[in-house]
């Protein structure tokens, strides 16, 4: 297979300036309430291609918090599992992770709370097979090796896809990986028969290798991202968090209306080919919403499934980890 290449793309500097200026003008900068004086730096953990990336690129959060003397520091992570560990260790104050990673962190007793959720993104996860593979349907995965992350969003979609086709998770041989690059390496080497990936890595593999998308998350998983924090931080700094989600909500509204500008903003930041980001952007919806009881019930299905398969050590009630304050204005 051809090696996937995601080079840094040099976007015209004047065009990037126009995009940033247009976003700032479209969103405006709202006044921020007086924040706690002891919170001088907000440490945010993020992963490639998520709504926090867009907010980071605009610089609007920094402008909104500046009057209160709060600075922002951004920390990139390879995946949600690594981000959650940093959050638990106190290296960052807030971060985002997939629905499945959030379940695994709660089951491990890390004591993090759900602050808010992102809009469903079912098309952003999927199972790839080589173009010339004999695997034509999900049923053909029986007895096959599938590279997938344990506790990753695509793992849940895979489980549900198997069940929908009369198979169980035990009918395949899961090959557990840690990062997207590990998955792609295993897939390209031919050591696995199929690979579970998530955007933008899924989009990159679709465009960079002779592959077929066997199944994506549609009808199987909402594939939500959740914003997480330690409960102590959430209770101590509600005004900082409200300011963050106010800016994030406005940024998401802009992103939903300007997909091409999103690609131009993120491509140099993430060092990913615009074609890859375009494919990923076309199949997602942007939006941050409150962590509601309905979303807790949605998450509970993941928790119950993972416990039934003994993938998490104990049963959990997802609602117990939902923060009891609505940080996202209506």
Image: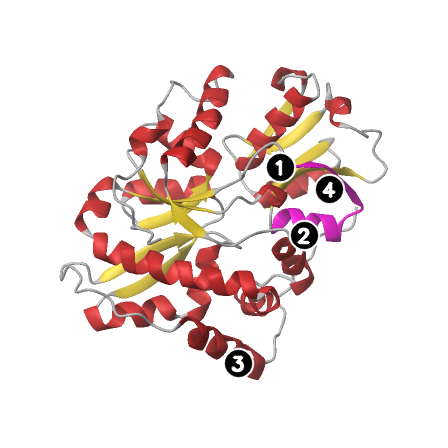
Mark number, residue 119: none
Badge 3 marks a residue whose secondary structure is: helix
Disc 4 secondary structure class: helix
| Nearest to N terminus: mark 4 or mark 2 | 4
Viewer-nearest residue: 279 or 273? 279
Q: Residue at x 28, y 56 (%)?
A: 242
Disc 4/disc 2 C-alpha distance (Å) = 13 Å
- The residue that disc 3 covers is 18
Q: Position of residue 229 (x, y in %)?
A: 30, 44
Residue 10: quarter of image:
bottom right
User: Measuring 30% from the left and 40% from the top, which residue is drawn there?
Assistant: 88
| For discs 2 and 3, the disc positioned in front in the rendered view | 3
Q: CA distance from mark 2 to mark 1?
A: 17 Å
Q: What is the span of residues highlighted in magenta in the rendered image?
A: 200-218
Task: Please give the residue where the numbered disc 4 appears in the rendered image.
Answer: 188
The residue at which mark 2 appears reads as 204
* Residue indicated by mark 1: 217
């Amino acid at each position: 297979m051809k090696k996937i290449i995601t080079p840094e793309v040099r976007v015209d500097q004047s065009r990037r300036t126009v995009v940033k200026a247009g976003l700032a003008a479209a969103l405006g900068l709202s006044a921020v309430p007086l924040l706690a004086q002891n919170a001088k730096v907000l440490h945010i953990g993020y992963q490639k291609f998520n709504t926090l990336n867009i907010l980071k690129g605009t610089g609007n959060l920094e402008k909104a918090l500046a009057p209160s003397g709060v600075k922002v520091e951004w920390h990139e992570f390879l995946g949600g599992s690594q981000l959650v560990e940093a959050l638990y260790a106190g290296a960052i104050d807030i971060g985002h992770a997939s629905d499945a990673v959030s379940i695994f962190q709660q089951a491990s007793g890390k004591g993090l709370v759900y602050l808010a959720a992102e809009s469903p993104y079912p098309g952003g996860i999927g199972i790839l097979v080589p173009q010339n593979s004999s695997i034509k349907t999900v049923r053909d995965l029986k007895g096959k090796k599938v590279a997938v992350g344990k506790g990753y969003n695509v793992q849940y979609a895979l489980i549900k896809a198997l069940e929908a086709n009369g198979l169980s998770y035990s009918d395949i041989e899961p090959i557990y990986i840690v990062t997207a690059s590990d998955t792609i390496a295993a897939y390209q080497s031919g050591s696995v028969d199929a690979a579970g990936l998530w955007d933008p890595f899924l989009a990159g593999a679709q465009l960079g290798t002779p592959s077929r998308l066997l199944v994506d998350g549609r009808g199987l998983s909402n594939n939500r991202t959740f914003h997480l924090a330690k409960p102590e931080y959430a209770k101590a700094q509600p005004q900082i968090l409200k300011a963050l989600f106010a800016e994030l909500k406005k940024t998401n509204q802009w992103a939903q209306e300007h997909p091409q500008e999103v690609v131009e903003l993120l491509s140099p930041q993430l060092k990913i080919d615009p074609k890859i980001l375009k494919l990923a952007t076309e199949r997602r919806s942007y939006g941050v919403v409150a962590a509601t009881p309905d979303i807790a019930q949605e998450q509970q299905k993941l928790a119950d499934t993972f416990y039934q398969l003994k993938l998490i050590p104990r049963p959990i009630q997802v609602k117990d980890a939902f923060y009891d304050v609505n940080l996202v204005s209506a």
